[in-house]
Amino acid sequence: MITMDDIIREGHPTLREVAKEVSLPLSEEDIVLGEEMMTFLKNSQDPEKAEELALRGGVGLAAPQLNISKRLIAVHVPSNDLENPEPLLSTVMYNPKILSHSVQDVCLGEGEGCLSVDREVPGYVVRHSKITVSYYDAAGEKQKKRLKDYESIVVQHEIDHLNGIMFYDHINEQNPFALKDGVLVIE
Ligand SMILES: O=CN(O)C[C@@H](CC1CCCC1)C(=O)N1NCCC[C@H]1C(=O)Nc1ccccn1
Ligand code: NI
């Protein structure tokens, strides 16, 4: 079972590598890895389990964060609507690829963090508001999804990890809260 001890922290070279494509058909090993990454996210969002296992709550995880330089990510974005507890997005993506994106940019008002970064790095992380992402699912089926806003931000943060990019690489060093015209700030 994955715990925080399995997550490598900034400074570890693997976080700056470009991860390798996963070979298809998916190996049992890669399928199990995806399942374990999804279980970590669900555990991390469960108050009891998170406390018991000392997990930081996470909505996404990329294999390089486990020192596994492969192009697979897991995302589990909880619903923000008590009426409908269904998660907004919950999937493992193998060889995810952004096919197209909006001109419109977006950023989280409270900035971003990372389970591999044990410090606050303030500033706006400007990303595409909408993306069309293709990927293979755990059944080896090719999928295509159009994502927007928070879900889009999460998937972009994870795909960055596959390319050795950290969220703070996007923050303007001169003025971390500088915003170009038209960038949408979402809370
Ligand atoms: O690469 C993947 N990571 O580094 C885990 C990150 C991924 C998100 C950061 C911004 C977009 C994707 C993550 O999830 N976090 N960052 C550090 C601590 C907070 C935590 C978080 O946002 N938790 C959360 C949010 C809503 C609901 C439940 N939990
Ligand atoms: Ni991260």
Image (cartoon, rainbow, N blue to C red):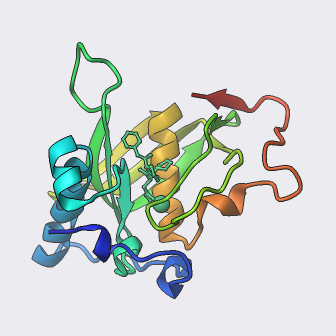
Outermost residue to the top: 83
Q: How many badges with numbers are in the image? A: 0
Most extreme residue toward the right, as rendered? 174
Above or below, 180 against 112 in this view is above
Q: At which x and y percent is residue 51?
A: 22, 52
Q: Residue at x 80, y 54 (%)?
A: 172
The front one of 48 and 178 is 48
Residue at the spot x=68%, y=50% of the render?
Answer: 122
Q: Nearer the viewer, residue 101 or 118?
A: 118
Residue visible at 26% across and 51% down in the picture? 44
- Residue at the image point whose x is 60% and y is 58% from the top: 167
Judge left or right: residue 81 versus residue 84: right
Residue 124 higher or lower than 121, as above or below: above
Q: Is residue 6 left or right of residue 105?
A: left
Can you say whether 130 is above or below 92 in the image? above
Q: Quadrant of residue 95?
A: bottom left
